Image: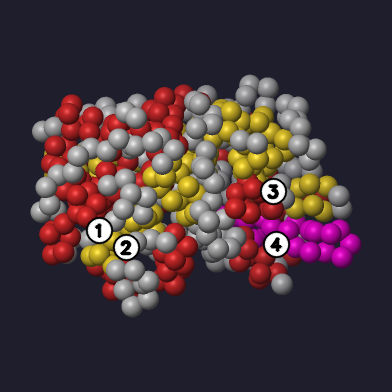
Amino acid sequence: MGRAVNLFATLDQAAARFGDRGAVYRGEQQLHTWSELRERALRLATSLRRSYAPGQRIAIASENRAELVELFYAVWAAECVVVPVNFKLHPREMVQILEDSGAATVFASPKIATELTPASPVVVELIGGLDYEHLLSAPPATVPSTDPSTLAWLFYTSGTTGRSKGAMLSHRSLTAMTVAHLADIDAPDENCSLLHAAPMSHGSGLYIAPYVLRGARQVVAASGAFDPDEFLDLCAAHPGSSAFLAPTMIARLVDTGRNGPSALRTIVYGGGPMYIDGLKKAMAAFGPIFAQIYGQGESPMTITGLRRIDHEGNDDAILGSVGIPRSGVEVTVLGEDGAPVECGQIGEIVCRGDVVMSGYWNNPDATRDTLKDGWLYTGDMGSFDERGYLTLRDRSKDVVISGGSNIYPREVEEALLEHPGVAEACVVGAPDPEWGEVVVAFVVGSFVVGSAADDALDAHLLDRIARFKRPKRYVFVDDLPKNSYGKVLKRELRARLG
């Protein structure tokens, strides 16, 4: 096998082409050139190979840190498997992932190590500590040649509906993701930068490979977190800045009142619904720099995409969509009978291609339910229009079936958000003895709670959606419960309804 199938090849190529250029930065401080990054990763790989056999899982639990870039590549060079752990999880939840993955060890930041060590079933290696520096004293490893089907990354779902599952992503899958990103979404070069604002354990970390392949510098905020002003300052300091952000993070950038500096090149958004009103505000603040991705951990970041050029026409139908199928990915919409539906009809979104996962780790039942005849069944409902743009309706489990009619919460939420008094809205279904389910809207906004507020929202919605889709009840709240990636936890809202 050629060495190009191992993700390490992206760093190998960058070091060969751009060896003396800056590769990794903490804030504005350069830490390593590409040649130095390659050598550090290979030294770590030698130390890993001395203790762990190929295929063993190496967990990483840390807030965003510059060392994560070299750690990912070291694990791949050692032909082991990266298991990034969401650092915002409770230690008990982290332990569940360590146990489920059968991790051989876990590299943790000092903050996480303090909390995790007492409960961890495996040795906790401190990132940046003396032992870590000792690992870097080993001689560089040889660059591996790896079968493309070899497991590279165990992507644990966010667990918003229950226990997390580990999606098995191979070197082939992540290579397909890398190529599709460069083909469809962004075309960085060695004069560009990737700012890691979102967690590197998930979306932002997955995007390391395409930007490394093109020699774009990797920039981690000195705070290790997302602070809007710090982020915008870094954009001004680093040329051609791109970043992956969740919609809630973009809203926080808009709230700063600062216009995007010229160095802010591309914002790729995804990971949750980006409502049209919020997107228009962001484009007004920062210009036509946005691209959208729709994907899942099971098909990492890569099912459909909305290109920058698609944002320029101010077409609401396009802005409200999730774009067109990505390069190398086949996407279709199936009806209840399992057959493709006609244009405009709603069904379950399925996809297939090299980017799709191999299955769920140690979970054959879930794998059988999700992968069928080579197709990934996403559980998302959507429809294609005549131009080939896919519009998401909702997760299949979130569709409200009231009196035999399907009501898609996102449509109601979009309409609610057009009201000037509504800051956030989330729609769920509540059991009802007569209708089966009724629509309930949780609303964050500036209202005096009472019948007048309900009447005002009813009147607003009657101008926008069918009468039967209106909420039967409004619940006014100070905020909506969200997970660490900004997704609203609908199960918590349903629990409040009893």
Please tell me how crowded label 2 is: few (under 14), some (14-19), or many (20+) other residues with Cα within 10 Å. many
Residue sitting at 64 percent across and 48 percent down?
A: 368
Q: Nearer the viewer, mark 2 or mark 3?
A: 2
N-terminal label among 2 and 4:
2
Disc 2 is placed on an element classified as: strand
Contact, mark 2 vs mark 1 (Cβ under 8 Å) = yes
Q: What's under tag 4, amino acid-wise?
A: Tyr
Please tell me how crowded label 4 is: few (under 14), some (14-19), or many (20+) other residues with Cα within 10 Å. many
Residue holding disc 1: 51
Disc 1 is placed on an element classified as: helix
* Rendered position, 143 above or below 117: above
Residue holding disc 4: 474
Q: Residue at the far top: name it.
A: 387
Work out whether residue 59 can be spotted: yes
Work out whether residue 476 can be spotted: no
N-terminal label among 2 and 1:
1
Q: Nearer the viewer, mark 4 or mark 1?
A: 1
Q: Position of residue 273 (x, y in %)?
A: 55, 46
Per the model, the C-alpha gap separating discs 3 and 1 is 45 Å
Q: Nearer the viewer, mark 3 or mark 1?
A: 1
N-terminal label among 4 and 1:
1
Q: What's under tag 2, amino acid-wise?
A: Thr
Q: Position of residue 498 (x, y in %)?
A: 71, 72
Find residue 396 and name its label.
3
Disc 4 is placed on an element classified as: strand
Find residue 105 and name its label.
2
User: What residue span does the magenta drawing correspond to?
Assistant: 424-447
Quarter of the rendering containing residue 277 = top right
Q: Nearer the viewer, mark 4 or mark 3?
A: 3
As for residue 226 lying within the magenta part, the answer is: no
Per the model, the C-alpha gap separating discs 2 and 4 is 48 Å
Contact, mark 3 vs mark 1 (Cβ under 8 Å) = no
